[in-house]
Amino acid sequence: MAAAKPNATNPRPRPRPRVAIVGAGPAGLAAAEVLCGHADVRVFDARPSAARKFLLAGKSGLNLTHGEPFDAFLARFGAARGRLAAALRALPPTAIRAWSHALGIETFVGSSRRVFPTVMKASPLLRAWLGRLTGAGVTFHFRHRWTGWDGADALVFDTPEGPARFKADATVLALGGASWPRLGSDGAWTDLLAARGVRVHPLRPANCGFDCAWRAPMQERFAGTPVKSVAIGFGHARVRGDFIVTRHGIEGSAVYALSAPLRDALEHAGSVALMVDLLPDTTLERLAQALARPRGKASLATHLRRAAGLAPVKVALLHEAHGRALPRDPLALARQIKSLPLTLLSTRPIAEAISSAGGVDLDELDAHFMLHRLPGTFAAGEMLDWEAPTGGYLLSACLATGRAAGTGAASWLDARAGAQT
């Protein structure tokens, strides 16, 4: 039977809209997952493969999300929580776990309430995710570095074969921040959007380490040594946990939790003092009593280890903060152990940071993550101006904003198609 010819009652099928997603990290892939049923979806990335930062972060155990109550979870996003709330509610931690399970990757909640895949790495999840996207018709274009738009508003890419152009009906930008640039997030997009009038805040290190003026013995003997079970404080904030001594200063989970206020303070001062309680589980009185025990011929370091349980790295930190001559009075010494000022001089470079702050001002976006100044162009992930601590919050927000931008782009395309009918 011959096919019916197009006419007023049998119109020619409208071609599927074309969507470009620039950035093949978690935010971009989350957008692609929403859009693949609405459009011809093309994902472009400068690197030779997808989600390289995601893979590296997952080598030591992929922290997918966090299992704390949702109100506490939302509060981790600080000043940006109001603008991110709808996206995070639409894809809460429970939904992220269900999504992972649907890909065949089971998860569990650790003692810290952090959520991990049972396989404890990223590659199986990414493999399953990319397989599902490819099966749904998503096309990937790697080694395509976005360089802006041409005169006809087509996207322009540098490729090994030369410049390439793609005219999209909608675009989702998911270009990341500027941490770990060798994996693809180099922040080069900031000038491209600023040239279009989009307000972009400077990218700054987040969840980062800090420089200290260590003396040579500290660098040589203790670089790489963990400092366990301490409490650190800055301003009104106090965090329990561990950190690591590096050749340059300190880094680690407890430090990352305070990195935002420490970084902001350093931008207005030449240095800041981080207060460290080396023995937070021991009261000042009990510690003074322990230190008052007869020392005999033991060295001070040995006495501190035997009487107070201070590891050598903690004794070294005492000397860094207070010099070689520590007080002989037990109470005065106990006070120094319980309130040790550690001087921080600067943040480590953004290339070493786990994540970055700054980026596209959230007021530049409508409720659907579309840029007011660039209709049809949406933005998601770490390129937006929000930050959060480690613990699954970063990945959660990248997935949630990616899905929100994808949903917004799908609605925008549907509205345009309806207006043209």
Image (spheres, rainbow, N blue to C red):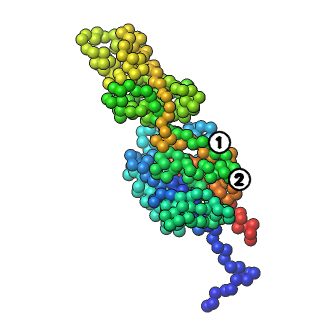
Q: Report the amino acid beneath label 2.
A: Arg
* Spatial CA span between label 2 and label 1: 22 Å
Q: Which residue occupies 51% across, 43% down?
A: 355
Mark 2 surroundings: few (<14), some (14-19) or many (≥20) residues within 10 A: some
Question: Relative to residue 142, is residue 118 depicted above or below?
Answer: above
Can the viewer see residue 381 in this picture? no
Name the mark on residue 404. none
Question: Relative to residue 100, is residue 345 depicted above or below?
Answer: above
Farthest residue to the left: give it. 297
Q: Which residue occupies 57% across, 42% down?
A: 203
Q: Position of residue 109 (x, y in %)?
A: 44, 44
Q: Which residue is mark 2?
A: 373
Q: Which residue occupies 49% across, 61% down?
A: 143
Q: Which residue is mark 1?
A: 82
Pointer 2 with pointer 1, Cβ within 8 A: no
Q: Position of residue 373 (x, y in %)?
A: 71, 53
Say what secondary structure mark 1 lies in: helix
> Dividing the picture into quarters, in which one does residue 330 lie?
top left
